[in-house]
Amino acid sequence: MKYGFSDRVKYLKSSAVRDILKVINQGNIISFAGGLPEEDLFPVKAVDEAFHKAITTNKKALQYGETEGVPQLRELLADRMKQKGLHRSADNILITSGSQQAIDLFSRVMFNKGDVILTENPTYLAALQVFESYETKVVAVDSDDDGMVLADLEEKINQYKPKCIYVVPTYSNPTGKVWSLKRREKLLELANKYHVVIFEDDPYGELQFDESETPPSIASLDENGLVLYTSTFSKTVVPAVRIGWIVGPHQIIRIMAQAKQATDLHTNSIGQHALVHLLQDFDIDEHIQTIRKTYYERMLVMKRLLEKANIEGLEYIVPKGGMFFWVKLPEEMNTTALLEEAVKEGVAFVPGAPFYVSDPEQNTLRLNFTNSEPALIEEGMKRFVKVLESTYINK
């Protein structure tokens, strides 16, 4: 039967990361492909107790809830954000089904067909999927290790009159870079000058390796109501809870809440009430310290083995936090083709091309270091380096 899909369907794209995971999960492959936290670090006992309390002490946990989210959870989030210099009212917080839904709801209420979004190149793949599904025009801004290049940003603001600037400025996916304070401040200055909304996506901000280098969120520097800030518990508690949040100007958050009513009524009540108990009864900050320490040690293992690769022109960014290495190989190498050879050797990564808005660099790739124990990283990287060196020699 031929189905009459909407025109919008042609703008939907499958995730390259998800497609790779389907393939590699079928065999005995060491995967550096997914952006997965370490299961052994999940606070299983604390989560179990929190859900038990939620179900047995408050019947509201089993009932329909407010679209905006459980008020007590929003208050606790407002307090946590204050500790990071982000002073926002709980009334301006919307609880979402992961931060991915925050991106989608924002796009639904803000963008018309053809509206322009400026972002870095490369950037978060799933955000590009959302933007493209709403028929927007995503334009890449030049960037370096400190963030967006300001001259190019201002030029493109003038040229394209964007509706929004989307940024992942702290331990970004895929590059792992962190913007300098100056670039954050200058981005805000330009947004104020040209009246452009900034969407700050911060799923990895808690995963910093050096506490002496704590970058302030762009939202915490905002005094004019131009920044929306979203984050999630997926990287610090467990992904399966699927709870994130977004805070921003009241008018935008209110309209997003109305859009959420039409989507799923509200984020699951049990998970929200469980998080209230978890935040009250469990030392989540001590838990985050354990995650940071473990991920830092794993990052160093992967870094050491990358350093051993005998390939002239191999470059990578040493992450100061987050979950990823971004690797650039000699220009003549194509990582999409390289993946096929890597899978044959029992190791997988994500080619860099899908993360690009335009002009993809085919010689780039992303490696995840958080979901494998050091011994597995050792073995996986030996296989990976073997494939790199064999391919490089044969070029």
Image: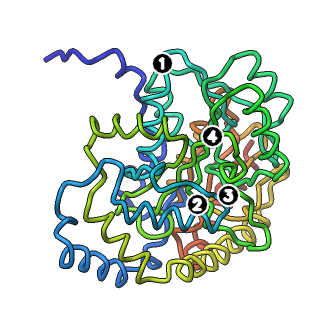
Q: Is residue 70 above or below residue 257?
A: below
Residue contact at pointers 2 and 4, CB within 8 angstroms? no
- Please tell me which residue is depicted at 83% across the width and 34% down the height of the picture: 150
Q: Which mark is residue 368?
A: 2
Query: Distance between the Cα atoms at labels 3 and 1?
Result: 35 Å
> Could you tell me residue 293's position as x and y percent?
64, 79
Q: N-terminal of the two: label 4 or label 3? A: 4
The mark closer to the camera, 1 or 4, is 4
Q: Nearer the viewer, residue 368 or 247?
A: 247
Please tell me how crowded label 3 is: few (under 14), some (14-19), or many (20+) other residues with Cα within 10 Å: many
Is 302 on the left or on the right of 186, as rendered?
Answer: left
Q: Could you tell me which quadrant the C terminus lies in?
A: top right
Q: Which residue is mark 4?
A: 225
- Which of the 4 image quarters holds residue 51? bottom left
Helix, strand or loop at mark 4: loop
Image coords of residue 155 (percent x, y) = 81, 22
Find numbered disc 3 in the image and state the secondary structure of the residue it sits on: strand
Q: Nearer the viewer, mark 2 or mark 1?
A: 1
